[in-house]
Image (tube, grey):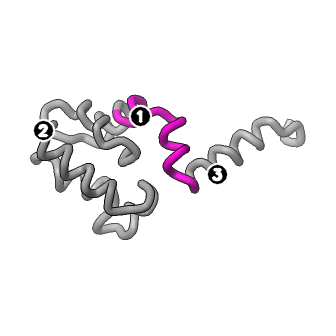
């Protein structure tokens, strides 16, 4: 979800310029969004919950909206491991050997 922090505006109740700035700071501190997931204590979801005011961000409610707003093309462009995984799934889907 850190591919484009501006897309967090879908979490309307907690959205503010301060929240946007904090999300941008996290995104800019790492080479790509995948590197943000560096430990269980600082996982992206924990960071997000720590940035939004309590009770205003819901991962199951807002996560899909944010991901949809960002789009898979942008996510794949910024997340090399995710892109490789999706490419492998596509290759398997194109393969005739599994049928």
- Circle 1 residues within 10 Å: few <14, some 14–19, many ≥20: some
Q: Is residue 72 magenta?
A: yes
Q: Secondary structure at mark 3?
A: helix
Q: Secondary structure at mark 2?
A: loop
Q: Secondary structure at mark 1?
A: helix
Label disc, if present, on residue 70 of the rendered structure: 1
- Residue drawn at x 24%, y 50% as measured from the top left: 23
Q: As drawn, is 94 to the left or to the right of 77?
A: right
Quadrant of the drawing holding the N terminus: top left
Quadrant of the drawing holding the C terminus: top right
> Are the two marked residues, 1 and 2, in contact with CB atoms closer than 8 angstroms?
no
- Residue drawn at x 33%, y 61% as measured from the top left: 43
Query: For residue 40, what is the image quadrant?
Result: bottom left
x, y (%) of residue 82? 56, 50
Q: Which residues are magenta?
A: 66-80
- Residue drawn at x 38%, y 34% as measured from the top left: 64
Magenta residues: mostly which secondary structure?
A: helix
Label disc, if present, on residue 16 of the rendered structure: 2
Q: Which badge, 3 or 1, comes first in the chain's sequence?
A: 1
> Are the two marked residues, 3 and 1, in contact with CB atoms closer than 8 angstroms?
no
- Circle 3 residues within 10 Å: few <14, some 14–19, many ≥20: few
Q: Is residue 30 magenta?
A: no
Q: Which badge, 3 or 2, comes first in the chain's sequence?
A: 2
């Amino acid at each position: 979800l850190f591919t484009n922090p501006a897309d967090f505006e879908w979490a309307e109740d907690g959205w503010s310029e301060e929240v946007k700035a904090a999300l941008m700071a996290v995104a800019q501190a790492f080479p790509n969004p995948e590197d943000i997931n560096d430990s269980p204590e600082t996982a992206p979801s924990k960071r997000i919950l720590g940035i939004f005011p309590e009770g205003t961000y819901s991962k199951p409610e807002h996560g899909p909206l944010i991901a949809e707003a960002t789009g898979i093309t942008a996510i794949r462009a910024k997340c090399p491991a995710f892109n490789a995984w999706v490419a492998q799934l596509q290759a398997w889907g194109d393969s005739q050997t599994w049928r």
